[in-house]
């Protein structure tokens, strides 16, 4: 066995840490379930969730171990291959990483940092003065933070789910866009989870969720599924990144080389490594789909498990998932357009990609309309007074502006744009996506707030308008997300170099081979 | 090896950080960072008297190391029978109000400047007595006037009367004295209230609530039909079996028509009328003029409903009509109806009006000749007494206010003398229960005084002493209190650990003398309310008082603010109840800020659209809009008495005409 | 649920006779005093942030010119099947063996899920640290803790009084009897419209009144089985 460098030991530590995490997750489930049994509380829910989530982490550990063993530990039969030189077109992909940032970029980052710092200040106000700095009150206990939580979690479906589905479907056009989608997922999930913490009256006690967790509460389901999703999508982002990190490693010097060395696991690009890597990607792609769906289903359960009018709905699970994918695609299109412009990636992110994603967006828009229709028609036809109060507050009452704006921006505008010629252009799809992002945020708002404004018993009707703190924190979340995303693009190639390269080299053959199998031989 | 050591250090660092984290986490999670409660100490219970209003309820105070920490009703007290009203329940907030006055103050600078200097009691008493003696020596027409709540008849009032008696005559004025009504609840079958929101404004709140429960359902008692005739859908109207909205001020006409029809139907006690009244025949002729059509037009009640009400009066007997004090005409009319019903005035009847003291037309009296010195005892005429009092007080050269709080009246005074709050006071008072029993309450202090304050009675006794030229004696009031209790055979009630603070005493209420119809007949000749339009001020302003602010007090206690407007869910502010149609005319939406304007001025309130109000009536609660009176009352809401036309002293106010404007 | 219906175990319940209740608000004030509830302010009232565990709910029906308004005193309905406790992620709200729905202030993380799950909107959130003038701290009921910022609180049927009654009963060497324990609202009610007692005792006033044909529960259709029963207004 050849002598290993320092990076190897750190990598081992990282792997061990992940084992510890897996162990902790499983142990936590066992401990809490035992505790709940002792207390005579409902432990079955915990058993079910534990049986689903615990093994999932073991699977993640196995995948990582498998990969680590193949790439970093195992002696390859073939020797170290020479690094493939970067072609001229490819140099555009690593230019943002190798070149020093320009003035415009620094200005952009400066703006993002100042907005984030402002949000930090707003948050400090909330920490010191409590939730009185929000616009919330009795009976509107949830507002912007929960809306943003649902919205951000929805956006997070951009990534992984789309990329995983496209990967499994062998859609070759996915190759340049998967990375940017997966990064959205991982980054935005943090802000989804952060909004829950912002919403807590006692964030200092958030560890109580682990110390005294009750699995009967949908919030615990959220904690479990979001943790699983964050882990899965981080792994799913990381694995396809390894060959690209290796490429970067070979092009930089100094501390950056160490950094990439550490993350590349000593990737050499041997065919065996590539084979195992692709297998791992395939496993993760399959695993991440149900996890992603579970996340947004469970988010919807937070509402639909209560008996409150227009929350207590059986279609909320799929409705939320559809909405999530819908807004996810929209966010992805916007992100791609920005990257294309900022880093000159016209060669990689081509109009055809936008057109295909636009078609997907159109499909989701129709699906969204269908679900929305189902949701509202049943409420209206059933005509329960409590439900109708909220129904009418949305359609013709206080929230009618929000509602009809949502209807326009989620369906009418995107549909008109995408179904027309404009849908084939970058500009058209981006415009439609911008509408959808606004509309989907409004949709989340319309789910959270109107139900709370009209409680079942005729109290004084509540009212809600966000305070400057809530608005600042929303802006801060967006800015910080953009910042993280930008930092990522400065550290790693946002278009997968090796996958595109592989596509260019092999895909054509494979596809024509595959197409041939679709039809009779003669 | 070098490299692996580095890795090892990193690992160690990581592990170290990991082990620190849980302990820090445990620290945050498990260490409650909450305000520690005061250490529990020695717990005692004492019996006392509430004193938040003149009703005279018995209370049981829970004390912890001498601090009052809980309050409940005395189980067997004849007035409250173990219960409390919201005001009584809030007595602890009165005691521990942070803006209470803590010692005598003398004003610096002009009136209302709000600059005060603390002085000693000796100095304050000396100055006031000096002013009184000086005025007395100058032989001015009115050297001294004393303004006090009419109720209760207690040892403090007695001391005040003593002071009044020592300087001239006719200088003792009670601000409110509504005639007490005694109800014989066991027999009554129909109770019709002519504009009296009695559940919220009865002078004895606890008894009123209990009476209602009794009327409704009580073992061995038939259910009473309760009718509320009132322009506003008040709490009483909501609780009544029937609510008849009526144009403000026309209740008397309706009562007279009913009387007329009862006479026509012959369903009245002829013998009773003969035995107790004078001038019946004239009255009978005088009410002839009231036709159903006219009455319906005046009152805006459909003819059908008026006839239905008449049928109720004919068939549900014994019946009683009650009336809050309002227009003298209306009051007489309802009394006349009661006479016709044979249900008023004697022992055998369903209800009696006892102690009909003539209400003093106080403010008017002083307008002509302002007193040299005025002592205001625990009332707030500047806030509660409409503009009249303000102008009267402006002409008084020297005003002294006795109150636990810096009220509006105290603000314009020259010297403010802080008195004990009810829990710190010595009590010795006489009360009547709703069914006519007389009760003597007597109790020592429930808690020791918190600040340098005195019993109201002690202040008056001191002043009297000094005015008479004697030296003030310490503790004189305590012994006076004891002696008076002994004279009333109530000394056993004063035992420090005593469980009983009350005893029943022989009835003291006067029975009504013969009822004379003639003033009413005269009034009918030239004072029948006409239907007058008012193009400029087309709406009626109807004022009502929530129980929380009854007698104009209570806005200074935060817990009472929370129960002020249960019907519209309005708290912590003044609102106006407006019919949606009226609101539409003025372009007003629910929750808007609006100006309510009368000929006297305008106030800004929050508009609440309520479909169950009368279209041309704007109802505004009284009690808020203080410019003083502690941190919670000051600057909150608006005082409709400032724009009301008419008498502000009545518990049931007359509003007058108004119009609306969007603010 | 079955446990608390076991014989020998108490199950506390309340009956409010709306025919007698006059909506005077004495119960609201008594509850506030007894439980050291926040003082409130106009700003907080405008934001709906004033906490009153017991409040008067006006339920109004307008039919043409005919109006009916019920003023309903509303404490926590103390559901037998409480929707709020199911959703709590940290065991901060629970139903005890005597049927009272409790709240652990020191554990609550302030997620406000239980408030949203409660169809009666009978739970409350401390949007800030309650402000108390020093003078008023003297009148704190020493048996009830003052809630910190950021946690949920609710009516506990004056649980501290039950605790005390139990201790007294033990000290006197007897079993807890029904009359030993009354919440502040029932004690203060001037119309005697609030009756409190043991639902497991079939002889008790509350059990008897629960069988009255006028008895109903708020939002009965949700199956929460409140232990606060109302008696309809009318004959």
Image (cartoon, coloured by chain):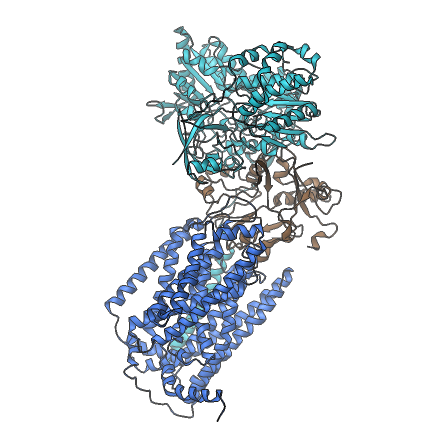
Residue C89 visible in the displayed image: no
In front here: B44 or A133? A133
Residue A513 visible in the displayed image: yes
**Chain A colour in the picture:** blue
**Location of residue B265 by image quarter:** top right
In front here: C22 or A225? C22
**Location of residue B285 by image quarter:** top right
- Note whether B638 is above or below A455 in the view shown: above
In front here: A394 or B623? A394
Residue located at (37% from left, 51% from top)? A468
Locate residue B192, reporting x and y percent: 62, 25
- Note whether A82 is above or below B459 in the view shown: below
**Chain C colour in the picture:** brown
Locate residue A116, reporting x and y percent: 34, 60
**Chain B colour in the picture:** cyan
In front here: A262 or B653? B653
Locate residue B235, reporting x and y percent: 57, 33
Residue located at (70% from left, 31% from top)? B223
């Amino acid at each position: 066995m050849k002598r290993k460098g320092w990076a190897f030991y750190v990598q081992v530590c990282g792997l061990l840490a992940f084992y510890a995490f897996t162990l902790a997750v499983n142990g936590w489930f066992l401990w809490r379930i035992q505790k709940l049994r002792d207390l005579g509380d409902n432990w079955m829910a915990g058993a079910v969730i534990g049986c689903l989530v615990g093994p999932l982490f073991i699977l993640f550990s196995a995948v990582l171990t498998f990969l680590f063993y193949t790439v970093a530990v195992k002696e390859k039969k073939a020797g170290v291959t020479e690094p493939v030189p970067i072609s001229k077109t490819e140099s555009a992909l690593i230019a943002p990483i190798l070149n020093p940032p320009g003035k415009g970029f620094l200005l952009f980052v400066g703006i993002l940092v100042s907005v984030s710092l402002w949000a930090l200040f707003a948050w400090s106000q909330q920490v010191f003065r409590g939730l009185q700095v929000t616009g919330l009150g009795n009976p509107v206990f949830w507002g912007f933070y929960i809306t943003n939580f649902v919205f951000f979690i929805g956006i997070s479906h951009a990534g992984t789910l789309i990329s995983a589905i496209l990967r499994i479907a062998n859609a070759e056009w996915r190759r340049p866009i998967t990375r940017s989608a997966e990064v959205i997922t991982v980054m935005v999930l943090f802000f989804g989870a952060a909004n829950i913490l912002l919403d807590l009256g006692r964030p200092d006690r958030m560890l109580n969720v682990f110390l005294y967790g009750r699995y009967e509460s949908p919030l615990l389901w959220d904690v479990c599924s979001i943790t699983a999703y964050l882990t899965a999508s981080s792994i799913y982002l990381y694995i396809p990144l390894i060959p690209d990190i290796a490429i970067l490693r070979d092009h930089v010097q100094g501390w950056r080389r160490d950094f990439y060395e550490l993350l590349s696991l000593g990737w050499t690009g041997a065919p065996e490594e590539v084979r195992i890597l692709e297998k791992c990607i395939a496993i993760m792609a399959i695993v991440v789909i149900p996890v992603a769906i579970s996340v947004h289903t469970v988010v919807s359960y937070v509402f639909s498990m209560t008996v409150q009018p227009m929350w207590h709905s059986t279609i909320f699970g799929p409705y939320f998932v559809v909405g999530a994918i819908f807004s996810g695609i929209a966010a992805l299109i916007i992100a791609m357009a920005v990257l294309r412009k900022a880093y000159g990636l016209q060669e990689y992110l081509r109009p055809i990609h936008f057109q295909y994603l636009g078609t997907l967006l159109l499909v989701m828009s129709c699906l969204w309309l269908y679900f929305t229709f189902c949701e509202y028609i049943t409420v209206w036809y059933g005509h329960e007074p409590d439900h109708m109060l909220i129904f009418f507050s949305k359609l013709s009452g206080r929230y009618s502006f929000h509602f009809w704006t949502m209807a326009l921006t989620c369906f009418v505008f995107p549909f008109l744009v995408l179904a027309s010629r404009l849908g084939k252009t970058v500009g058209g799809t981006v415009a439609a996506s911008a509408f959808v992002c606004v509309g989907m945020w409004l949709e989340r708002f319309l789910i959270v707030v109107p139900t709370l404004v009209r409680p079942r018993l005729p109290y004084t009707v509540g009212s809600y308008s966000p305070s400057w703190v809530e608005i600042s924190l929303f802006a801060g979340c967006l800015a910080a997300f953009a910042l993280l995303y930008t930092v990522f693009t400065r550290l790693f190639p946002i278009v997968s170099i090796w996958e595109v390269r592989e596509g260019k080299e092999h895909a054509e053959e494979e596809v024509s081979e595959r197409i041939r199998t679709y039809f009779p031989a003669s | 090896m070098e490299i692996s050591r580095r890795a090892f250090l990193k690992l160690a660092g990581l592990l170290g950080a990991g082990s620190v984290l849980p302990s820090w986490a445990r620290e945050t999670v498990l260490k409650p960072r909450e305000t520690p409660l005061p250490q529990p100490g020695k717990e005692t219970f004492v019996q006392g008297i509430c004193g938040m209003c003149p009703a005279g309820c018995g209370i049981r105070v829970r004390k912890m190391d001498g601090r009052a920490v809980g309050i409940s009703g005395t189980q067997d007290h004849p007035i409250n029978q173990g219960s409390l009203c919201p005001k009584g329940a809030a007595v602890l907030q009165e005691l521990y109000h942070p803006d209470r006055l803590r010692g005598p103050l003398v004003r610096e600078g002009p009136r209302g400047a709000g600059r005060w200097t603390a002085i000693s009691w000796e100095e304050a008493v000396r100055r006031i007595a000096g002013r009184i003696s000086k005025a007395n020596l100058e032989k001015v027409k009115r050297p001294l006037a004393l303004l006090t709540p009419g109720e209760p008849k207690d040892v403090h009032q007695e001391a005040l009367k003593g002071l009044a008696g020592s300087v001239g005559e006719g200088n003792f004025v009670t601000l409110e004295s509504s005639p007490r009504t005694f109800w014989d609840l066991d027999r009554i079958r129909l109770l019709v209230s002519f504009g009296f929101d009695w559940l919220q404004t009865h002078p004895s709140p606890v008894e009123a609530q209990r009476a209602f429960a009794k009327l409704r359902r009580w073992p061995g008692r038939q259910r009473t039909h309760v009718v509320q005739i009132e322009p506003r859908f008040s709490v009483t109207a909501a609780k009544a079996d029937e609510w008849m909205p009526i144009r403000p001020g026309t209740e008397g006409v309706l009562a007279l028509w009913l009387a007329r029809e009862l006479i026509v139907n012959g369903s009245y006690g002829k013998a009773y009328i003969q035995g107790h009244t004078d001038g019946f025949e004239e009255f009978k002729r005088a009410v002839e003029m009231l036709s159903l059509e006219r009455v319906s037009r005046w009152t805006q009640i459909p003819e059908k409903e008026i006839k239905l009400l008449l049928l109720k009066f004919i068939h549900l007997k014994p019946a009683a009509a009650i009336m809050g004090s309002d227009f003298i005409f209306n009051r007489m009319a309802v009394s006349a109806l009661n006479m016709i019903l044979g249900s008023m005035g004697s022992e055998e009847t369903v209800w009696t009006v006892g102690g009909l003291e003539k209400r003093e037309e106080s403010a008017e009296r002083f307008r002509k000749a302002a007193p040299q010195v005025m002592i205001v005892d625990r009332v707030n005429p500047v806030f509660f007494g409409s503009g009249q009092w303000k102008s009267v007080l402006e002409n008084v050269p020297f005003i002294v206010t006795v109150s636990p709080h810096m009220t509006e009246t105290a603000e314009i005074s020259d010297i403010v003398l802080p008195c004990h709050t009810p829990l710190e006071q010595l009590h010795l008072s006489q009360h009547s229960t709703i069914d006519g029993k007389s009760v003597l309450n007597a109790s020592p202090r429930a808690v020791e005084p918190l600040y340098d304050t005195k019993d109201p009675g002690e202040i008056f006794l001191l002043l009297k002493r000094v005015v008479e030229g004697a030296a003030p004696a310490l503790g004189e009031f305590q012994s006076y209190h004891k002696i008076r209790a002994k004279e009333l055979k109530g000394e056993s009630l004063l035992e420090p650990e005593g469980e009983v603070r009350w005893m029943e005493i022989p009835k003291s209420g006067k029975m009504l003398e013969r009822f004379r119809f003639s003033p009413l007949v005269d009034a009918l000749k030239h004072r029948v309310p006409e239907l007058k339009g008012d193009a400029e001020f087309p709406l009626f302003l109807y004022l009502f008082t929530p129980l929380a602010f009854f007698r104009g007090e209570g806005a200074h206690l935060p817990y009472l603010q929370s129960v002020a407007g249960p019907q519209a869910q309005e708290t912590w502010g003044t609102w106006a109840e407006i019919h949606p149609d009226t609101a539409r005319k003025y372009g007003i939406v629910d929750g808007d800020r609006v100006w309510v304007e009368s000929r006297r001025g305008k106030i800004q309130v929050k508009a609440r659209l309520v479909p169950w109000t009368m279209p041309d009536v704007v109802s505004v609660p009284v009690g808020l809009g203080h410019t003083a009176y502690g941190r919670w009352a000051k600057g909150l809401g608006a005082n409709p008495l400032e724009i009301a036309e008419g008498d502000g002293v009545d518990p049931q106010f007359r509003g007058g005409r108004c119009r609306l404007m969007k603010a | 649920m079955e446990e608390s219906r076991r014989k020998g175990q108490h199950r506390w319940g309340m009956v409010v006779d709306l025919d007698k209740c006059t909506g005077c608000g004495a119960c609201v004030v008594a509850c506030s005093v007894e439980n050291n509830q926040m003082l409130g302010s106009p700003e907080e009232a405008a934001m709906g942030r004033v906490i009153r565990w017991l409040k008067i709910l006006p339920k109004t029906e307008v039919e043409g010119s005919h109006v009916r308004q019920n003023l309903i005193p509303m404490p926590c309905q103390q559901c037998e099947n409480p929707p709020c406790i199911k959703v709590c992620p940290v065991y901060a709200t629970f139903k005890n063996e005597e049927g009272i729905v409790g709240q652990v202030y020191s554990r609550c993380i302030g997620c406000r899920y239980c408030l949203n799950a409660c169809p009666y909107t009978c739970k409350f959130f401390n949007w800030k640290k309650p402000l108390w003038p020093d003078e008023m701290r003297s009148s704190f009921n020493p048996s009830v803790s003052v809630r910190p910022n950021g946690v949920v609180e609710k009516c506990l049927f004056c649980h501290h009084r039950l605790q005390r009654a139990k201790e007294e009963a033990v000290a006197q060497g007897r079993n807890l009897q029904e009359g030993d324990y009354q919440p502040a609202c029932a004690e203060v009610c001037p119309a005697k419209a609030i009756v409190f007692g043991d639902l497991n005792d079939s002889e008790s006033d509350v059990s008897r009144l629960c069988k009255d044909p006028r008895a109903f529960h708020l939002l009965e259709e949700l199956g929460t089985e409140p232990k606060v029963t109302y008696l309809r207004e009318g004959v």
